[in-house]
Structures are given as structure tokens and as C-alpha cells.
Image (cartoon, rainbow, N blue to C red):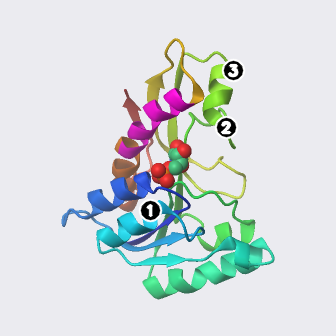
Amino acid sequence: RKVAILISGGGSNMLALARDMADPGHPAEVCLVLSNRPDAGGLARAAEMGIPTAVVDHRSYPDRASFEAAMMAPLRESGAELLCLAGFMRVLTPGFIEAWAGRMLNIHPSILPLFPGLHTHARCLAAGMAVHGCTVHEVTPDLDSGPILGQAVVPVEAGDTPDALAARVLPMEHRLYPPVLRRFVAGERAPLALLA
Ligand code: GRF
């Protein structure tokens, strides 16, 4: 199965997925890493692994629909059958999501349905949570609300700042996303739970 990974930044989740898919026994392979930011650090990391990359700069388009139409070209050319959003920071229109219905995953740094949207670590601390974590889910038109495919949990520790909490969650994202993708490609939908 051909997988395209969409990024906007450093691409650490993309790397975790790409390294896992480098296993010849993996049922999927990375066909493209696509970024909406020309300066995304993940582009060089993907290129170092020999993975084809593309940039569709959202700032070059007047609206979301034309930006998404521009993304479809490299996605189609790459033969992508499944999309993994990995640190991709653009909200997608229902039209684009519909075109990839059932074939687009995302990782979000909270235990959904808690804290959809941005600044999840600060909101978690403000709520006085004892636990935090990340969720891999299918992408549906409602932001961060599709069927949950996996979750990983970490403790909130005394004195945690949002950055300290984010730094504890990120490695769990890298441990969660690869096995969830394997299960998804294998047709499994029961959510995976990773406890720290
Ligand atoms: C991180 O904040 C992560 O929690 C979220 O996207 C951001 C960048 O991730 N999933 P990456 O290093 O670009 O994968």
C-alpha cells in the first residue's frame, strides 16, 4: 500500500513512520513526503532517506480549495493510496477529506476527545490533569474528531511546563503512530492503547 506523509515542520513523526516502513516486511511503503512549508526540516530528513518530496506552499494560493487542488497533483503522481498527517498544520476542507475518506490518518497531541485544536499541553496543565498523551485517529470533517485508532498515555509531572510535557508526549507519538499504521493497513480498527 502506498502512503504519502504530509508535514509542516521537523517531521519527527514522519521519520518514525518512514523508518518503520523501511522494513521490507511492512505492508506499506512511503511514496511521498509532502509539505506546505518550503522550509520544513522534515523535507531534508526525507530526502536523506531517499524518499521523494514535494512542496505545495499554501501561501501561494488564494484559498484552501485551490491549495488542496494543487496538493492533489503530486499526491496523484506519487500513487498515494493512504495519507498520514504528521505535524501537518493546515485545516483541510470537507471536500478534500471526503476525497480521502477512510484513507487519511492524523496524530494529535492529546487524549482525544480532550483538547482538540491547538495548545493542547498548556490546556492539559490548566485543567490540572494527571495524565496526557496523544491520539492517532481517522480524519473526518470535524477537526480532531474521527474514529480513534490508538492512544498513548504519559504522566503529568509536578512543575511541568507545556514544553516539558510536549517533550514527554512526542516520543510516545513516535512509538504509537507506526504500529497503528501497520494495524490500519492490515484492516484492523480496534484502537491500540500504549501505557507509558
Ligand atoms: C508536534 O507538536 C507533535 O505533537 C504534533 O506535530 C508537531 C510536530 O511534529 N503531532 P513533527 O516533529 O513535525 O512530527
42 in the magenta segment: no
Q: Residues within 10 Å of mark 2 (few under 14, many from 20)?
A: few
Left or right placement of residue 76 versus residue 183 in this view = right
Q: Main secondary structure of the magenta part?
A: helix
Q: Is there a contact, CB below 8 Å, between mark 1 and mark 3?
A: no
What label sits on residue 119 in the rendered view?
Answer: 2
Question: Depth check: 177 or 168 in front?
Answer: 168
Q: Is residue 77 above or below residue 3?
A: below
Question: What's the residue type where badge 1 is placed?
Answer: Gly
For the point 71% across and 58% down, the residue is 141
Residue that protrudes farthest toward the right in the picture: 62
Tell me, yes or no, if residue 152 can be seen here: no
For the point 44% across and 68% down, the residue is 43
Q: Residues within 10 Å of mark 3 (few under 14, many from 20)?
A: few
Real-space CA distance between mark 1 and mark 3, rounded to the nearest whole angstrom = 31 Å
Name the spot of residue 179 as percent of width and height, x first. 33, 49
Tell me, yes or no, if residue 120 can be seen here: yes
Left or right placement of residue 180 versus residue 50 in this view = right
Q: Is there a contact, CB below 8 Å, between mark 2 and mark 3?
A: no
Question: Depth check: 151 or 15 in front?
Answer: 15
For the point 60% across and 18% down, the residue is 129
173 in the magenta segment: yes
Residue that protrudes farthest toward the front in the picture: 39
